[in-house]
Amino acid sequence: MKQLKSLHDLALFGASPAFAEPLHVGRPNLGSREAFLAYANAIFDRRWLSNNGPLVQEFERRLAEFLGVTHCVAMCNGTIALEIAIRALELKGEVIVPSYTFIATAHALQWQEITPVFADIDLQTHNLDPEAVRRMITPRTTGILGVHLWGRGCPVIELQAVAEEHELKLLFDASHAFGCTHDGVPIGAFGECAVFSFHATKFFNTFEGGAVITDNEDLAVKMRLMKNFGFSGYDNVIYPGTNGKMTEMAAAMGLVNLDAVDEFVAVNRRNHVLYSQRLNAIEGLSVLAYDDCEQNNYQYVVVEVGEAFPVSRDEIVHALQAENVLARRYFWPGCHNMLPYRAFYPHVGLLLPNTATVADRVIVLPTGATVDESQIETIADIFNILSYSKKVGYQECCREFL
Ligand code: T4K
């Protein structure tokens, strides 16, 4: 692997990239290929591909057990799962959400003509600030949609108190939090229900997929109807519905990956520890920590770039990408700065100062089984070189080479 010693060794300034192939954020975590192919063969033999097949049923059973809930309703993706949960809870008017999340959280509301009202986050946790939520409540508010960002539980007790005080429904987007706990309690135990994404890039994937988990039987029954056009047996529709069904192949992938969860955690944790050791030693950088007293999936390596670092966050991302490290600026610039929300509320940023600060600071780095320790050392070297450069030196190099 290329040795990186000075600014002149950076690809940005004409050197060859540190990595011949791109290192992605979000390379899928994969369980046993053989086990998956065995499931695929059985699917072929059975000719049962979708519509609540045997693997989906097994997947739902095993997932409910793993996640510590009574009901797991598997879906075709996390966005549809969110939409169905929101609809089944009969939310309307306005629902309070963080702006600092993947756009699907807000879109799932807007798609149903419910107004997402953005509340600010806490600077340290990156999760919703309950006081900010309180400030955004109006007579039209019907719910709070919290997000357990990066897999770390948002303040569920405080949000529950706000919800009860104002008679609001509370649900959670747990897309990042598969297998995580909050205060030692499995993450799906809070609120009316929790929604997961099993997209390829998530800690736990089913190619595409999602689920809503809940202990509320009535809610589960309603969501099962909704995800299957409202069919209750042949020729009998008793509810308005959509097509949110998970396929058998997706469930097969889920079953295989469920068996490999401990391996995924171990690799992610190893990477997270190494990144933290190397990057926290550099002034102006801090790697978001996971509480070792909780269960975490360590899926996101989130680096915050402070003012003490001599190069801006965007310049770092540019330099990393030139080296084939395809770091991401999740979730910049915040949902409120994307359309249609930016057009709806052009000044809402004034109420979201922490969202802006965090969105401007964060870099998410590649991890998972396709990233090894020597690659992390090289990525840390890139940060080190950038950090040694005084701002002026870096800018001079930019002028010279670009
Ligand atoms: N709520 C939250 C909080 C979410 O984070 C998400 C999804 C949702 C709701 C919605 O759930 P879904 O409807 O998606 O199930 C990605 C994912 O597409 C998205 O699912 C995810 N959040 C979000 C955080 O990240 P992008 O556009 O940033 O990344 P994408 O899809 O371009 O993939 C990133 C990289 O991963 C690629 O450059 C290459 C690599 N990759 C990707 C795929 C799909 C692979 O190596 N193999 C693959 O198969 O959104």
Image (cartoon, rainbow, N blue to C red):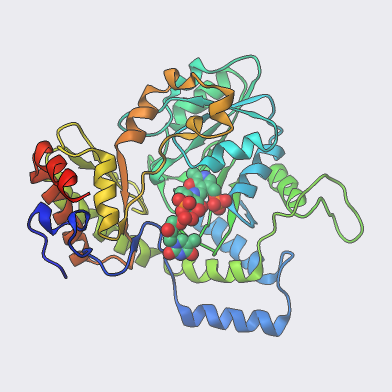
Residue 180 at what x, y percent from top left? 41, 49
Residue 247 at what x, y percent from top left? 66, 66
* Residue at 42% from the left image edge and 69% from the top image edge: 260
Q: Note whether residue 325 is visible.
A: yes
* Residue at 46% from the left image edge and 45% from the top image edge: 187
Quick check: 91 left or right of 361?
right
Q: Note whether residue 216 is visible.
A: no
Residue 42 at what x, y percent from top left? 64, 82
Quick check: 14 left or right of 96?
left
Say above or below: 332 vs 383: above
Quarter holding the N terminus is bottom left
Q: Nearer the viewer, residue 112 or 82?
A: 112
Q: Nearer the viewer, residue 321 or 180?
A: 321
Q: Residue furthest right?
A: 235
Say above or below: 161 vs 41: above
Say above or below: 162 vs 74: above
Circle count: 0
* Residue at 71% from the left image edge and 39% from the top image edge: 88
Residue 128 at what x, y percent from top left? 43, 29
Q: Nearer the viewer, residue 344 or 267?
A: 344
Quick check: 280 left or right of 321?
left
* Residue at 37% from the left image edge and 28% from the top image edge: 356
